Image (spheres, rainbow, N blue to C red):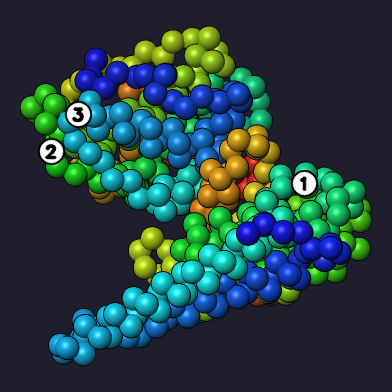
Amino acid sequence: MSELRLHPEALPPTNEPLRLAVRRLRWFKAAFLRYVDGAGRELGCRFEVDEGRLAALFVRWLDSMSDQKPQGRDDRRDFFEFAASLMLRELTADMPLRVVGTPARAAPGSAAAVWPEGYVCTMFCLSVHCAAVEQEFHAKVVVDPAVDDLRHWWSFRENAREDSNLSAGFLQMLLGRQPNWLVPTIFRERITRSAPAPE
Amino acid sequence: VSFRLPIPPDPIPLREALRGLRHVLRRGGASVAEAVSSEVLPKPAADLAGAVLESGRRVVHGAGSVAAGVARTVLGAEPAPAPAFDGLIAQSESPAKFAAAAYAALKVIVVRLGAGRAFVSEASALQAYRRARPALIGATAPQAAAALALALTEARVIRSAPADGHDGRGRARTVEPLAVFALLLWWLSPRPEEDGEAALEAAADIAAVLEAEVAEACARRDEPALAALFERYAAHV
């Protein structure tokens, strides 16, 4: 498992279910800032956050979710995963983080050392998703071992630069899914077709 | 010095006058400092100009503090909790409560929008609410918010100079419709009392993201478009 563990306690307290809290900008922002701050301490660097970008990507995320939200309860858990992958898509489309200094405590050659911003954003999405799934479905999320494979991270970074939609596929893969790499951000297309993973 | 007036005055016009005085003093002081920079003057003129400017700044600061102090101690300008939005629609809340809560919230919002120097008018908020009240009867919450937003914009509850508003990247923005939209978005949103300032900032941030839609809807006085935006985003503050 990668260096940053998935800390549910890193998320701010809320009296609401997480699935609701995460869709409120004030909680989402507080959670992101707190997570990033903790990640910076663990990795031995500091991150600057552009709060304007964060708000803009939050609104885009809301819009893209509400446009695709399924009606049936059968799809509910799948949609939780899908929502987390859309969040990563928005974070990588207009990265709100900038690392200041080098992550001195990250293992050399690790994903956190090679691409700290992308790594922290991915782990944030996974952390929120894991906490929400545990709360809603009383289930533990198992993250795919690919999370520790630097080759996947190189591929993720290069592909996200070309097309941020592929970030969604990357997160779905980390959650053990076979993403539809042609249209990884369209919920109803998630299973019906599949295409080979990008090189 | 604390004292009580023998006959309690109508507090809103007096508060407004004192705040106006404070605004002019602060704004004037800042304008002088911006316009006259002693750094570009040769010595000894620079030293003399610097001393004069410093004295002026102290006078302005002192006068502004006095105005603010009088507003607080004589007229009781402590912010009260914002009444529930349903109470505003049902008109079970007084217009004065609406205006006081709107003023306190807008002061936070304009700072978040990069327009801390803008003047917020409690008296205009009062006037706008009184005017909009008939339109609120039977309206849904988003419709009522839209009607109030247009009334507040028309009453010029925010008065700012064109250069006042800016985003985090230094781009100019038109503050008035955004601040008013953020105010009503915040008012509609479900939130615990302790989330006060964080919720206000979140509402301002969402308004800033929706700048183009909000500005267009306000310019066209398009109530249904504004109501649709309130309905879509109020739960996400």
For badge 2, the amino acid type reads Thr
The answer to whether marks 3 and 1 mark residues whose Cβ atoms lie closer than 8 Å is: no
As helix, strand or loop, the secondary structure at mark 1 comes to loop
**Spatial separation of the CA atoms under disc 2 and disc 1:** 49 Å
For badge 1, the amino acid type reads Pro
**Spatial separation of the CA atoms under disc 2 and disc 3:** 9 Å
- Classify residue B153 by image quadrant: bottom right
As helix, strand or loop, the secondary structure at mark 3 comes to helix
Label 3 packing within 10 angstroms: few (<14), some (14-19), many (20+): many
> Residue under circle 1?
B83
Whichever of callouts 2 and 3 sits on the residue coming sooner in the sequence is 3
> Residue under circle 3?
A43
Residue located at (44% from left, 78% from top): B29
Would you say A19 lies left or right of A98 here? right
Picture coordinates of residue B131, whole percent (x, y)? 85, 69
Residue located at (79% from left, 63% from top): B5
Judging from the image, mark 1 belongs to the subunit labelled: B
Image height of B1 relative to A20, above or below: below
Q: Which disc, if any, is residue A102? A: 2
Label 2 packing within 10 angstroms: few (<14), some (14-19), many (20+): some
Image height of B162 relative to B123, above or below: below
For badge 3, the amino acid type reads Leu
- Classify residue B179 by image quadrant: bottom right
Is residue B132 shown to the viewer in this render?
no
